Amino acid sequence: MPATLPNRDHRIDTAKGALIVLVVLGHLLEVTNFWDAETFRLALTAIYLFHMPAFVFLAGITAKANRLPERAGGILLLLLTFQGLYWVFDTLAGTPQQFS
């Protein structure tokens, strides 16, 4: 039997799982151009309106303050690395560069 953490709140795990399902649903609806249909546009807007703030909130209430500078530095390094790779691949693909 797997060991469970004594302070783990399964409601948070359930909320994160539901948010992940909404993210996948939102991306699937977006790919099929449901932004053009008013009924689905409302659903997509509702999903994109709250799912990221909810993820940030849930991550914040479960985060520990130890090693915060190290974690922030790791995230910044990943961001800069993948933004750089994205720019390189975008340039190689010949996609017009638009910055706003």
Image: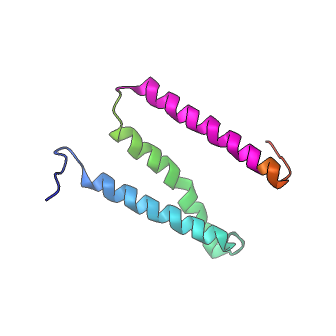
Q: Is residue 8 above or below residue 21?
A: above
- For image coordinates 85% across by 53% down, the residue present is 94
- For image coordinates 51% across by 54% down, the residue present is 50
Which residue is at the front of the view, 41 or 28? 28
Residue 65 colored in magenta in the image: no
Prevailing SS of the magenta stretch: helix
Q: Quadrant of the N terminus?
A: bottom left
Q: Is residue 92 above or below residue 44?
A: above
> How far from the left and from the top, in percent, is residue 99?
80, 42
- For image coordinates 16% across by 45% down, the residue present is 6
> How far from the left and from the top, in percent, is residue 4?
18, 51
Does 11 sit left or right of 19 as displayed?
A: left
- For image coordinates 16% across by 51% down, the residue present is 3
> How far from the left and from the top, in percent, is residue 41?
64, 69
Which residue lies most toward the front here?
92
Q: Is residue 71 above or below residue 46?
A: above
Q: Is residue 94 above or below residue 63?
A: below
Does 68 sit left or right of 14 as displayed?
A: right
Q: Quadrant of the C terminus?
A: top right
The quarter of the displayed image where residue 63 is located: top left
> How far from the left and from the top, in percent, is residue 44?
59, 65
The quarter of the displayed image where residue 27 is located: bottom right
Magenta-colored span: 66-89
Residue 77 colored in magenta in the image: yes
Does 6 sit left or right of 23 as displayed?
A: left
